[in-house]
Image: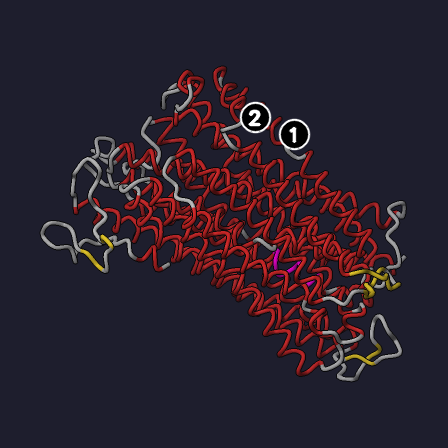
Amino acid sequence: MVYTSRVKVSPQNLSDNGNKKNNGFDDSLIEEEEGINDHNTVLKCAEIQNAISEGATSFLFTEYQYVGVFMVAFAILIFLFLGSVEGFSTKLQPCTYNVDKMCKSALANATFSTISFVLGAVTSVVSGFLGMKIATYANARTTLEARKGVGKAFIVAFRSGAVMGFLLAANGLLVLYVTINVFKIYYGDDWEGLFEAITGYGLGGSSMALFGRVGGGIYTKAADVGADLVGKVERNIPEDDPRNPAVIADNVGDNVGDIAGMGSDLFGSYAESSCAALVVASISSFGINHEFTAMCYPLLISSVGILVCLLTTLFATDFFEIKLVTQIEPALKNQLIISTALMTLGIALVSWVALPSSFTIFNFGTQKVVKNWELFFCVAIGLWAGLVIGFITEYYTSNAYSPVQDVADSCRTGAATNVIFGLALGYKSVIIPIFAIAISIFVSFSLAAMYGIAVAALGMLSTIATGLAIDAYGPISDNAGGIAEMAGMSHRIRERTDALDAAGNTTAAIGKGFAIGSAALVSLALFGAFVSRAAISSVDVLTPKVFIGLLVGAMLPYWFSAMTMKSVGSAALKMVEEVRRQFNTIPGLMEGTAKPDYANCVKISTDASIKEMIPPGALVMLTPLIVGTFFGVETLSGVLAGSLVSGVQIAISASNTGGAWDNAKKYIEAGVSDHAKSLGPKGSDPHKAAVIGDTIGDPLKDTSGPSLNILIKLMAVESLVFAPFFAKHGGLIFKLF
């Protein structure tokens, strides 16, 4: 952040001529290429930045108060459920996988699982909050740097995103490593119990991520839809026009949804994939023989990933300088390619140093002999499958390629054809990512059973710092464009920030692709750990108990999506009514002589999102508890499998459809090619049709789609944590008959 902090958003320290040198750096950054030196513009940027930061902080504090109550209530539930497995006994009990050995009591497991749950939840919340603070610190600075050129603005936005990526990845790794070592003091040689207790860490991280994603997603899309429908379609004013009462709420939403929510989401994925790998490893030769270095193999992968991503960022900011708009998207894509190539070497090194040449991995009651090079292939295939998913996502969501251009072209005949083309694109975009995930699962399971799938998921997430950097870059650039428009900066500045934002839209879609792909692998690994933990020898889909679970599980993502989509619709309805009211009742608002009531729109988004996030969250959190308690572990295993298979498809489709509609709109607005010019300009009928498509796609790509990957992971990790209780006391209804 040192580089970003050199950009000053307040001119109070400037000398009379507007230039003050500090160690060779020009701090003023207010000389436009046209030669204008306007202090008021800088003050306006600072004022807008403060309003966005205060709005985002206020919303997150309100959200965390509600989430804090849930966290305490659920922590008590974990303790009561797991403690009651052996009647809160403090006596040692036979180990689950080796009955000849004695393990720590059920009460100890309940206590330490609860502690790790709280630690995971707090780390997730802190990660999201710090990410939001970094983004709101960087947005106005990106706007001001855009006056020097697109390259300078890119570096500020990208480096700020990178700070968030490294902070989150290192944060999660550090807390997990310290927790393991502290727990080890009590557990001693009982590594099975130790790492079962650690699974609470993944549950805590993901449960907070769910509320962050859903709450933040509803907030941002309610404001965005309200601002677009009234401002751009009805009143025909530009995006982020300061006359629009919803613009501040819209920019706040980018930070609480796309930054804080996304940060918590990817932290949850990382925590769960680590926990899944550690649980399986603890009952393999690593845990049985107490080989701590080999046991920490999942953490070592993530550690090397941080170093690799640190080196990779230099390619975007130091080794190659961005000078043209056309270089932005290739620079971000190269980040993915370079980090993947370097990480492959890093995995090979870690696998050779940390792992014995041959070892055994637990595989549904037996121990499978595995070589260290086989485990390397498991991680590597997950890593490269992530890259494939990223590039396919880019192909279907970037307006540089024909799919999005076809969607834009369909706007000639109105919004209906735009919607039809967009939906078809989303469905088609599922095909190759699913094949990539399927091949990863087959190869990694063949080589190293469920442990192979868990480390494949970690491989996909090993470059999480780079993924978060290019993901966070998008909302920062989006905010920068909004600030430029609201501060009344020149058209050239807005063009530069729009170019940054268009590239950011595509990279955000790539980030969502990574999150969804890793969620599928993580969920399957957690499912395998749950089946082992619940002592299920096999899952037979022809059994009625399992089949009804499959049907219900496949339905849950649709139910969840319906709730989140309707929540956005309800909140957006209130926002549209408020924006219309202000335009109709405030004299001089359209003329720009009166100031809109931004605060009221911020309040509407906050109240609506807090209220509406509770039902979808309750659906996800309560389903495993109800199914496991009343219908038993076999039915619950069916629910987990059904939700995984169904949820991944809907998540990819929704995310890519929304991304394509958004970039189709930007393709028409930018008017770079002859084809795009024939569809424009802003305000034309094709452009209005594109805006409607983008409005429909907003809740798909930023609320329902990204939240679904948390649904499939969270239900799996929750089932794993409560598995001892379900195995002992579950299936109450079937026991009655």
Q: Position of residue 96 (x, y in %)?
A: 83, 71
Q: Nearer the viewer, residue 404 or 369?
A: 369
Q: Indicate left or right for 506 with 382 as reference.
A: left
Q: Measure the alpha-carbon separation of dots 2 and 1.
A: 10 Å
| Residue of label 1 | 428
Q: Name the disc covering residue 403, or none.
A: 2
Q: Which residues are the magenta region? A: 269-276
| Image quadrant assignment for residue 220 | top left
Q: Indicate left or right for 128 with 192 as reference.
A: left
Question: Looking at numbered disc 2 in the image, what kind of residue is underneath it?
Answer: Pro
The outermost residue toward the left is 16
Q: Position of residue 128 (x, y in %)?
A: 48, 58
Q: Indicate left or right for 37 with 394 as reference.
A: left
Question: With respect to residue 369, does 240 lie above or below?
Answer: above
- At horizontal 59% and vertical 61% (from top left) the residue drawn is 304
Q: Is residue 11 visible?
A: yes
- At horizontal 48% and vertical 27% (from top left) the residue drawn is 664
Q: Earlier in the sequence, mark 2 or mark 1?
A: 2
Question: With respect to residue 656, does 172 lie above or below?
Answer: below
Q: Main secondary structure of the magenta part?
A: helix
Question: Looking at numbered disc 1 in the image, what kind of residue is underneath it?
Answer: Lys
